[in-house]
Amino acid sequence: MSKSLDFEVPVVKLREKIQELKEIAKNADVDMSTEIETLETRLQQLETKIYTNMEPWDRVQVARHAQRPTTLDYINEIFSDFIELHGDRSFGDDEAIIGGIASFNGQPITIIGHQRGKTTKENIRRNFGMPHPEGYRKALRLMKQAEKFKRPIICFIDTKGAYPGKAAEERGQSEAIAKNLFEMAGLKVPVISVVIGEGGSGGALALGVANRIFMLENSTYSVISPEGAASILWKDATLAKQAAEAMKITAYDLKAMNIIDGIVIEVAGGAHRDVQAQANELKECIHNALTELTILSETELINDRYDKFRKIGEFIEEEVEVKVDGKVDVEVEVN
Amino acid sequence: MAIRSLLSINKKKQKGVIVDRNKENSFPADLMTKCPECKKIYLSKELENNLKVCTNCDYHYKMTAWERVSILLDEGTFESFDENLRTSNPLKFPSYLEKIEIDSLKTGLNEAVLTGMGSIKGAQVVIAIMDSHFRMGSMGSVVGEKITRAIEKATEYELPFIIFTASGGARMQEGVISLMQMAKTSVALKRHSDHGLLFVSIMTHPTTGGVSASFASLGDLNIAEPQALIGFAGRRVIEQTVREKLPDDFQTAEFLLAHGQLDAIFHRKEMRDKLATIVKLHQKGGVSNV
């Protein structure tokens, strides 16, 4: 049983209670089926109530859950024939990003994703899913390779952010991220990005210039972590819960702002509760998006990506028109 | 006022604060400036005449966007774009618009970037100049939109695009919309580049975060001013992460040049000449020696 999160404690407690009653009934030979039934109905109601009314901060907790499925979990469930490809060909192999080729419903594709570890040991090897420049350069190498062989690219986003370290700066973290944004804009093949956990800032966006962007229901996508936002905006990192709300980082927020194309509904309580069911949900989403995109020509794909990002931004445009009589007429148009 | 008291006023001045033109004749403290680097004190007028570069140690002071226009472009050629765009408050952050209003009055800009068209030694260019006096030069929707529109104009008119960056990064108050401006500007630059057009990025102090990780690093030529702070993550964040003291020159232009991250560093005094030469060398149909 995986660790429970604060907001779901009532559910976990009730579930334990039911289990307890069942044990007693079995051992003491007493009929408690009515009581158990009543409690199970209540559990169902409670689950619905809690899991359908999750606060942004609850979702942050689910997105960061140690057992939350990673890129590799989805690769294993959704794709066949996966062969991992390593290295950026100039510095090293960054295990915080994983990539390779596989087949999806019989179609060759390229997969690239941030890769967290599930154990401390693996997390150290994978740097907690926070890439160095060579990780982004490996990703770009595999994207260009996909383009050559006309394979669609599927990206999984799951990172707190690009690694803020000395070596990362020396090797050009900024340039590596920027180059990915630039080159992804010009890819002649379909690109689909799915945020499966945390989508942290530029380090996430560097795998995110896609034709279609989806988010798992409990994932987040933001310019800065709630803790970081709280400490910059209010000089107090403990206000992270409030920041999670103010910064509008949930899948529903991003859908409302028209930044993402769709939300992949999660199994009750979060993807970690049933990886296979979650993978099936995600598989269908990728399948549908690919079907839409494969009919587009190379130019159409590039233009589609251009238009998608071109329209993001909220501002007021005052139209200044000089009228015939010389008066200036100001119209306000909200974008 | 005795010269001694003038000097003591200057000593209290904040690091890097420089003459406000509007107050030129009202307060004597503005008469003198003390270099934050070498501590030399000189007449502010002298500093202005030297393109806001310390006459003693070459320290490059921050410049406003309009000051850069006046030292870079041929006189009277600059035409400003999109001054009618105004910041909205998509995430409804309290007092956000008030802060914008204050900086707008202070700088005379509608947002943290000035964009437009002009000529450098006769060659037409589209130019964007960020101003760190406006909300630390941070990038929200209007900054992203103005830069993107400028790039699109450059593509449409087949002109070189030149940007002077100065920014603390993405603007927190516009959340993920700010983040997406990195992608928006980058897709526009890709299209500009695919038309075979020149993009020169000049990073000035400071260029960090989301701006450094998007258009600032995407020049065909990536240039910097001397000693400019350029980097992805903040120094304190890195020190906390790696738990070691970073070298003094960490994330300076010189550090980046030594690590192969820049094409060149240009002194402010040679900026106009060098840019004119670069633009000339990229003109279609070869170099005409005028």
Image (spheres, coloured by chain):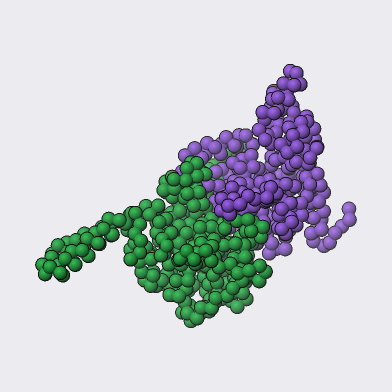
Residue A167 x, y percent position in the rendering = 64, 58
Q: Is residue A131 above or below residue B48?
A: below
Q: Is residue A86 above or below residue A160?
A: below
> Along the line of sight, which residue is nearer the eye, A97 or B181?
A97
Q: Who's the residue at 22% across and 60% down the image?
A: A17
Q: Is residue A318 left or right of residue A75?
A: right
In the rendered image, which quarter is residue A207 located in?
bottom right
Residue A324 x, y percent position in the rendering = 62, 39
In the rendered image, which quarter is residue A151 located in?
bottom right
> Along the line of sight, which residue is nearer the eye, A269 or A87?
A87
Q: Who's the residue at 49% across and 66% down the image?
A: A121
> Along the line of sight, which residue is nearer the eye, A166 or B52?
A166
Outermost residue on the top side: it is: B1
Residue B92 x, y percent position in the rendering = 46, 43
Q: Is residue A259 visible?
A: no
Q: Colour of chain B?
A: purple
**Chain letter of the green region:** A
Q: Who's the residue at 39% across and 59% down the image?
A: A62
Q: Is residue B237 left or right of residue A51?
A: right
